Image (spheres, coloured by chain):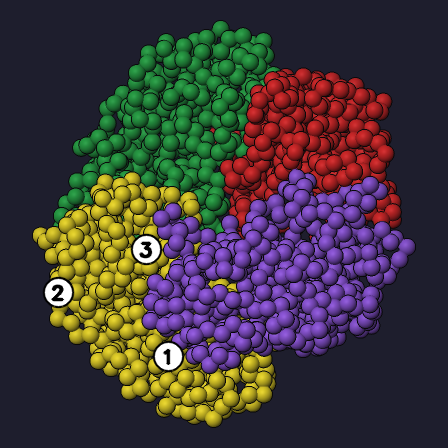
Chain colours: A yellow, B green, C red, D purple
Amino acid sequence: MHPTPEVDTDKPREECGVFGLHVLPEAGDLDLATLCQLGLFALQHRGQESCGICVASEDEVRIEKAMGLVTQVFTEERLGRLAVPGARTAVAHTRYSTTGSSRLYNAQPLTVRSNKGVLALAHNGNFTNARELRDAMLAAGAVFQTTNDSEVMLNLIARYSHLDLRRATAMAMTELEGGFSVVLMDQTSLIGLRDRHGVRPLVLGSLAGGWVLASEPAALAVVGADHVRDVRPGEMVVIDDLGLHSEQIMAPTPAPCAFEWIYFARGDSVLDGVSVHDARVRMGERLAQEAPADADVVIGVPESGLAAAVGYSRASGVPYDIGLYRSPYAGRTFINPTQHLREQKVRLKLGATTAVAGKRVVLVDDSIVRGTTSGRIVRLLYEAGAREVHFRVSSPPIAHPCFYGIDTAARQELAASTLSVEEIRRRIGASTLAYLSEAGLQRALGQPSVCLACFNGRYPAGKPSEAPGAIASEEETVLA
Amino acid sequence: MHPTPEVDTDKPREECGVFGLHVLPEAGDLDLATLCQLGLFALQHRGQESCGICVASEDEVRIEKAMGLVTQVFTEERLGRLAVPGARTAVAHTRYSTTGSSRLYNAQPLTVRSNKGVLALAHNGNFTNARELRDAMLAAGAVFQTTNDSEVMLNLIARYSHLDLRRATAMAMTELEGGFSVVLMDQTSLIGLRDRHGVRPLVLGSLAGGWVLASEPAALAVVGADHVRDVRPGEMVVIDDLGLHSEQIMAPTPAPCAFEWIYFARGDSVLDGVSVHDARVRMGERLAQEAPADADVVIGVPESGLAAAVGYSRASGVPYDIGLYRSPYAGRTFINPTQHLREQKVRLKLGATTAVAGKRVVLVDDSIVRGTTSGRIVRLLYEAGAREVHFRVSSPPIAHPCFYGIDTAARQELAASTLSVEEIRRRIGASTLAYLSEAGLQRALGQPSVCLACFNGRYPAGKPSEAPGAIASEEETVLA
Amino acid sequence: MHPTPEVDTDKPREECGVFGLHVLPEAGDLDLATLCQLGLFALQHRGQESCGICVASEDEVRIEKAMGLVTQVFTEERLGRLAVPGARTAVAHTRYSTTGSSRLYNAQPLTVRSNKGVLALAHNGNFTNARELRDAMLAAGAVFQTTNDSEVMLNLIARYSHLDLRRATAMAMTELEGGFSVVLMDQTSLIGLRDRHGVRPLVLGSLAGGWVLASEPAALAVVGADHVRDVRPGEMVVIDDLGLHSEQIMAPTPAPCAFEWIYFARGDSVLDGVSVHDARVRMGERLAQEAPADADVVIGVPESGLAAAVGYSRASGVPYDIGLYRSPYAGRTFINPTQHLREQKVRLKLGATTAVAGKRVVLVDDSIVRGTTSGRIVRLLYEAGAREVHFRVSSPPIAHPCFYGIDTAARQELAASTLSVEEIRRRIGASTLAYLSEAGLQRALGQPSVCLACFNGRYPAGKPSEAPGAIASEEETVLA
Amino acid sequence: MHPTPEVDTDKPREECGVFGLHVLPEAGDLDLATLCQLGLFALQHRGQESCGICVASEDEVRIEKAMGLVTQVFTEERLGRLAVPGARTAVAHTRYSTTGSSRLYNAQPLTVRSNKGVLALAHNGNFTNARELRDAMLAAGAVFQTTNDSEVMLNLIARYSHLDLRRATAMAMTELEGGFSVVLMDQTSLIGLRDRHGVRPLVLGSLAGGWVLASEPAALAVVGADHVRDVRPGEMVVIDDLGLHSEQIMAPTPAPCAFEWIYFARGDSVLDGVSVHDARVRMGERLAQEAPADADVVIGVPESGLAAAVGYSRASGVPYDIGLYRSPYAGRTFINPTQHLREQKVRLKLGATTAVAGKRVVLVDDSIVRGTTSGRIVRLLYEAGAREVHFRVSSPPIAHPCFYGIDTAARQELAASTLSVEEIRRRIGASTLAYLSEAGLQRALGQPSVCLACFNGRYPAGKPSEAPGAIASEEETVLA
């Protein structure tokens, strides 16, 4: 139906963006559905498979969700159906996942009727003990319609039938393990929360007459909201007509995901007080100090490698230039070149400019997952006349899977889990190859403590009791 | 997206068709999805809004459902996604309802994971105590994602966590009130059941190496199955690799819906031992005896009035002819004639032939709900030269709502609930108007006991504790 | 994209329906696009592949055409695009053809800019000398973008650059051979014409403040127009703000197509003064006289065989009944039963009622092309308990192709071109088989002269100089 | 249906990309349709409204064209329909235009049957004397179905009925005025030509066993072809099984469009021997010399302003940084922010990074058309903390319309046609504003002669005899 965006299998994939807002009666008749659409559009890079918006007044709840990009799904017609008179609260979600229309059942927000009224929930991240919790509830007679962690959390909240929504949510939060940010609403209030490690981001903004929650600050800006602060690790914020209430449900032990700064988050985001752009430039600067190269020009792999390339140039004194043209249409291609043109595939996305001809080139990228695309880019540069290609990666080698909402490749596919740096260099055909060190990354981030599990295998928020691969394949069986 | 079929608002509307099958390993690799598609196609007249098919092997369950007609929804692509290797069990459903894409959440079959494995359920009819049951389960911590009775039944079954599927279903069946037929499956068995009154039909067929359940016999014929018998009121049949097992869960007190024979069921169906075609001819014959007319020709309103017209002609001796041409494209029109052409609207569907010119016409129809269309047809005949139009209805006046799965109009819109026969005659402009009597209908049906609630307000399977209108509008609020 | 209606390959296929109107300024601001949509809807049976509407004011011309049924193509959005302010003239077309989206180029009306302004043309039928005319114009430097006869006629009209539209059209009409009805417009007038044999129908209606042209009277009725008369063979009517002008361009030698009355036209049409319904009843009556049968019941194959069955019953005294239920959804199926269910295919469309059980049945159909479906229907009746099946066809055997706009099968596929009646009887498995005689058909029609070419190979309007198969396949090459 | 990409109304819009190839029998069975798809994908930036591919063998011609992006239009199904056995020649086209489905009639390639066989033609640019040529052919009896210049050229070629395709095309070429590149095919040969000024680009590539023509070199690279050379102004190349033949039909008077280097062409293109990337860097360098600024950082407006920003930084010594994040989804947005969020619109596309906070910023963009977006970007930077914003434009002010295939705004909307530089500076709110001079641009391009008509109003290839606005609106009337 719609052209599914091509997944760059040589980059980790984020799984979700969340958005929510609550406005006071005095804010007037705002079009909450359109505000959600704008917010989701600004978070589209966090998930391109499906998206959904739930809008409620005290009298009525409406939801629309579908497979596709925000601009494909939220047509005038669908936005019109979400025009709830007197709407005051809304949550929205954009999601990455694999293909297949039946996955619509897993699209978020998830909406249920419960003993606390109608609830809608959207999350980013993973509960590492979701399976145990679900098995216990199944035994007690619950039924599950999706394979989505949101359904586990909603059932958990409903089990506290003697508590109100706020207290039941707080209790559920203490039972859930893993890395996650959640936005949840009933017909009169909006709740936001972040796991005690703050693995996934969640920011708070203020709007004339209301409050906004979002995965990244850009989603605040597009709806005209001011960026107030980050929701804190372990914090639950409750927004209703009485205003904003904060409760520190669990003691914070911060470990935000380093990859948000390295690759996922937008270049204009500031997360947990650290500018993504500045962090990337500093990663490049440190990389230049740790792994200098005798070269004529520094170029970056667009888009995520460009800021680090600027930093590398700045610290090394080697001139910066634009060596790769990126097709603005590349993201949506499903073109399958015939066999003998497979090598040409990278050319659908990238073309080398004359900036590299006859030069010794430093090529900066943010990460290498499998290495396939990296090798093709190196060859592209040689064909365009580069004399040497010094590949520099502005993060450490990825060697471990993520259990907190990011889809890296399976472990055996991760180049760095089975190959040495020299072996990877040979595979991609670069003149030299170097990665930023863990210490260098931490200093570039300037954060006392970040999650580096995909680099070093140390999981601050625990691991699921069973291998995630196994769970996933069983889930498939349940409700394909 | 798809052209939704126009609803003839002057006819009652059936709400569902169900279909299910289980085949033995020796049946070979049958394409269960295509068999379901054929079965649903034969039941399309029972519901045109959405449809779904769930197919399972012992290892895997897949489901596809969407808004639209069977031929629109089940494209080659969707059928391909349902090609489960080693598939043995399947259930399918086609549903009538109002418009709105969010109604997709209410499409059936409904599929859940439970303590009895993965279950898929499809039903036709209504549980009159669904609301009480749901309220009790909500209080106990359950959450509901749809406004569909199927979800109530699935939760009810899961609550019997100490019983196996068969016993739990039997227990649930005794708790449920109203008029309903259900097909239910797990990954190794198929269950069919009919409420103790047998309000809605369910028939059993045998296939080489398997068994089939369906709302009407035509759905057996299109998949090459033999019609074995009707499932009995209060009976539960369980089909698995050990064969067919029958249990009479509740003592039968038969009251099958008379409207199945009057209008809903296909003319080639035989339900509970009574041929639909023969019953309609007999209704016409009795109508001729009860309400003769001095006329030149008998014509029927296509399609459902034709058989009764043949009966009327046969019993009265007045010659039968084809007085109305029905456009084969009429069913799908959403054409909106401009204001001054509103009267022309009936012409999109019907055109009078020369058979009525200069004649005194007996016009036979199966029922009158509002009377709007009836009046337009009468005018059409006069314009085509009819000298007199004697309107004869082959069923009694409809004056009460149905609570067992049929959408008649709201009570105040039913012509017969507020107007006398003479007032209706004047509204529709007929020379004379007569309805078949209740006694005449019962004798034409030749059944000792049928549900005539919409005619006489006596509800054999009870009424919901609250007005259905009120419930419906609250449900709307919950999950539009 | 859209579910293409299944083609019943055992029936001849009509190729087009045309519609046009011109309204005076005093008619006010009529919505011409919606009037065209209504008219096309009433003509949908004449072509289901593509449709188009062209609407013009003196200042502006707009056209919309697409593959699909009228209700699929003319959405609110498309009708909105056709809302030309001050619109006064419109032509519309619905077309049958084979599949393939590139055939959109052949959809009508065809619109061109010429030395006579912008012209839009739609036709029904074929020009047997189209190839010669086109070859001559190609040699003179013309280019052709379609394989459509309309383009030939428009080029022909433009070649008369010294004449005005009316005179140029009259000249073109005299050059064109074959069987055709045409509606043509510029921005101020509407022209309708029929070949001198009147092979294809064209009727004239009057609307308050305007005139309407259409292939059948039902299209007049749906727009509220009165049926004035048929356009005469060889006549050209010109409608503009001065009113209706008629010119008899060529001397009429009437030979209207008999198949319009046998099968194509709607049962409520009256063409060239003869009621389609009455003609069909008379065909059945004559058939009963020519080929009586010792039987218990007469049934018709819905829909086109029903009226003849009524006539057969009336003349023979054998009671009429409804023996076959026809699914109202049959027309749109593209369901492909798996191999072992091929025989079930007819059951998607038809089901036998209990009316035939234990009976000796007369089965009346309007025609047999290949005989495949006929054989399946006979088996269906036997399976439903018929003791004998006496097949009666209310027209003579079809043994020759049509060159005037009807797609019969290729000659070698026509059962009657290679098999004797007895051989066909054996193929379809009937107890006896009889066709109506040519003389019987002519008397039933009561027309002095009709085109019976598909029965007797005598072509009143000539044949193309080359085999049509050859032309068609070459055309395919040109612009697939 | 498909999300039409948003048009950045503050940039000129290119109107077309062309592509063609011819392969020898020894090249084996290449999938020409997929090669065309790849080529068009690489040219997608030159036109996003519609696209088409025509593929031919000696025996068969097939064409597919539709509204939408290359990846939307050329699904597996459509490519499958283009799989002509033994295909040897193909042309393809991608087109920018305004909205409206009826514009499908104007999609290219245009395919006609003529006295030279079936021809398919695609062009980029405009014929300034198209109207005169068409009027003459209309008078002589031709009809036109589109408002497309391609139809004029095809009719012109067909008029030379005594000449073969090659000679007739050469004659047509001498009659046509304006700026255009054309690819044209019959079933055995491919022809490419460029007007004598070479206004629009056309490059030639060689493939194993064949030749390729394309608007830009990137389209050669994606199909694995080597870039051989540019087609020369006034040259016609003919490619058939005998190889490549070149004829200099008209004496070249080169005046290639400067805007190809400034904005349109991809950054990895080399056109007429000049690297687009290098030219843009040089424009930035010269701009720094002509219009220095006392600043802390240089940033570019992505994507087209980035290379000039690198050049500005290099020549001025002011550090380069990435000050604006561009959403990769921006191109497809049709989001309409509500009124009070209009100012937020630019935020859907761009977000300022922390690189500008507290800085005096030089902002480099390639051009200003209306100035609306420019003003919004300036405000975005101030809100992000920029202390000063020095706007630098790497081309001269646009003050005149283009008649050679580019859609600049209407003259009265061009900021520079009515406002002084100081007035524009005030409108956009920049601290200072400066444009590159014409002389500076010419030196940066290093071409002896380029078309600068949109800057200085001197049209090297002439102007249409009537105002283009007037023609356009009349065309609208003809065939909307």
Q: Residues within 10 Å of mark 2 (few under 14, many from 20)?
A: some
Q: Residue A214 carries which label?
A: none
Element type at marker 2? loop
CB atoms at circles 1 and 3 under 8 Å apart? Answer: no
Q: Earlier in the sequence, mark 2 or mark 3?
A: 3
Check the residue under mark 1 and report the chain it is in.
A
Based on the displayed image, in which of its 4 quarters is residue D41 positioned?
Answer: bottom right
Q: How far apart are marks 1 and 3 (CA)?
A: 28 Å
Element type at marker 3? loop
Residues tagged by mark 2 and mark 1 found on one chain of the structure: yes
Q: Which mark is residue A281?
A: 1
Question: Residue sitting at 68 percent across and 65 percent down?
Answer: D451
Q: C235 or A221, which is in the foreground? A: A221
Question: Residue sitting at 16 percent across and 43 percent down?
Answer: B135
Check the residue under mark 3 and report the chain it is in.
A
Query: Can you give x and y, in whole percent of width and height, for residue C205 in the image?
Result: 65, 20
Q: Residues within 10 Å of mark 3 (few under 14, many from 20)?
A: many
Q: A205 or A20, which is in the foreground? A: A205
**Picture layout, residue A305 above or below residue C261:** below
Query: Can you give x and y, in whole percent of width and height, for residue C254 in the image?
Result: 80, 23
Quadrant for the C terminus of chain A, please.
bottom left
Residue topped by disc 3: A224
Query: Can you give x and y, in whole percent of width and height, for residue B358 in the image?
Result: 58, 9
CB atoms at circles 2 and 1 under 8 Å apart? Answer: no
Residue topped by disc 2: A249
**Picture layout, residue B272 above or below residue A446:** above
Q: Which of marks 2 and 1 is in front?
A: 1
Q: Which of marks 2 and 1 is nearer the N terminus?
A: 2
Is residue C325 something that shows in the picture? no
Q: Distance between the residues labelled 2 and 3?
A: 30 Å
